[in-house]
């Protein structure tokens, strides 16, 4: 369903609007504007309920600059689309919940020599990799600084291609034809959440976000779009 269809379904099921359903999500006022805004907000809240939703995970690729050690997410491209990243939220997490899983190869040599970089905690990285004179070389380790920048060490001595995962910022519905990126089978959860928000507006306090988990099909969405729970390594 697109944004307009979700707004129309939500409007119809509130039982508080008489007459024609909205024909657009823009330029609405009063009650219809409230409904449109809550549909938009409900989808944002759903996306923020878990940082591991599959539809918000993607892969990045990009090149280092010789002598440059720190990189913003928007410096890279989405590997699937080939376009510059415009919805960067954070460096990604592997499906098992581990680190970014960053890999690198010398661009001129090609992907055949691609290998993994080791992740370091930022405090340890800054204490061991950022002190004294930095000798350029092929990066071997990485971390993420307090400003969310990816930092590699040693300082790149040439052009290397970096590949890894990233999480997108929530998709914001704005136009009639905007289609939520979450699986189509679960689009009605957006409508159900919006109806709960409208009910809270009409009847009393705003419902807490944890109530999202009580919506129909929410557990099915989690099972479909979250990583499987796995046994950890032996303790001894």
Image (spheres, rainbow, N blue to C red):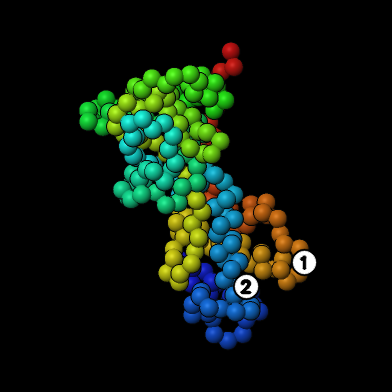
The residue under the point 48% across, 67% down is: 174
Q: Earlier in the sequence, mark 1 or mark 2?
A: 2
Mark 1 or 2, closer to the camera = 2
Instruction: Indicate which disc residue 34 carries.
Output: 2
Question: Residue placed farthest to the front in the image?
Answer: 133
The residue under the point 36% across, 30% down is: 67
In the rendering, at what x and y percent does residue 57 appear? Answer: 45, 45
CA separation in Å, label 1 and label 2: 15 Å
Seen in the image, is 11 located left or right of residue 177? right
Q: In front here: 125 or 223? A: 125
Question: Residue placed farthest to the bottom in the image?
Answer: 19
The residue under the point 59% across, 62% down is: 41
Which quadrant, please, contains the C terminus?
top right
Q: Which residue is disc 1 drawn over?
A: 204
The residue under the point 53% across, 31% down is: 230
- Image vertical order of residue 112 relative to residue 60, above or below: above
Residue 225 in view: no
């Amino acid at each position: 369903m697109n944004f307009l269809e979700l707004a129309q379904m939500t409007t119809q099921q509130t039982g508080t609007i008489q007459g024609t359903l909205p024909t657009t999500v823009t330029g609405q006022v009063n009650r219809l504007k409230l409904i449109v805004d809550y549909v938009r907000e409900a989808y944002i809240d759903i996306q923020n309920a878990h940082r591991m939703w599959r539809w918000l995970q993607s892969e990045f690729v990009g090149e280092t600059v010789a002598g440059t050690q720190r990189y913003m997410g928007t410096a890279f491209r989405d590997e699937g689309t080939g376009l510059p990243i415009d919805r960067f939220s954070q460096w990604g997490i592997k499906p098992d919940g581990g680190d970014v899983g960053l890999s690198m190869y010398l661009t001129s040599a090609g992907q055949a020599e691609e290998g993994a970089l080791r992740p370091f905690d930022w405090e340890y990285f800054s204490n061991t990799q950022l002190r004294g004179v930095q000798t350029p070389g092929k990066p071997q380790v990485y971390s993420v600084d307090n400003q969310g920048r990816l930092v590699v060490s040693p300082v790149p001595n040439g052009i290397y291609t970096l590949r890894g995962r990233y999480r997108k910022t929530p998709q914001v519905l704005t136009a009639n034809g905007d289609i939520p990126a979450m699986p189509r089978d679960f689009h009605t959860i957006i409508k159900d959440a919006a109806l709960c928000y409208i009910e809270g507006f009409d009847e009393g306090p705003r419902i807490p976000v944890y109530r999202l988990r009580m919506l129909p099909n929410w557990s099915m969405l989690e099972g479909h779009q979250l990583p499987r729970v796995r046994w950890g390594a032996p303790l001894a």
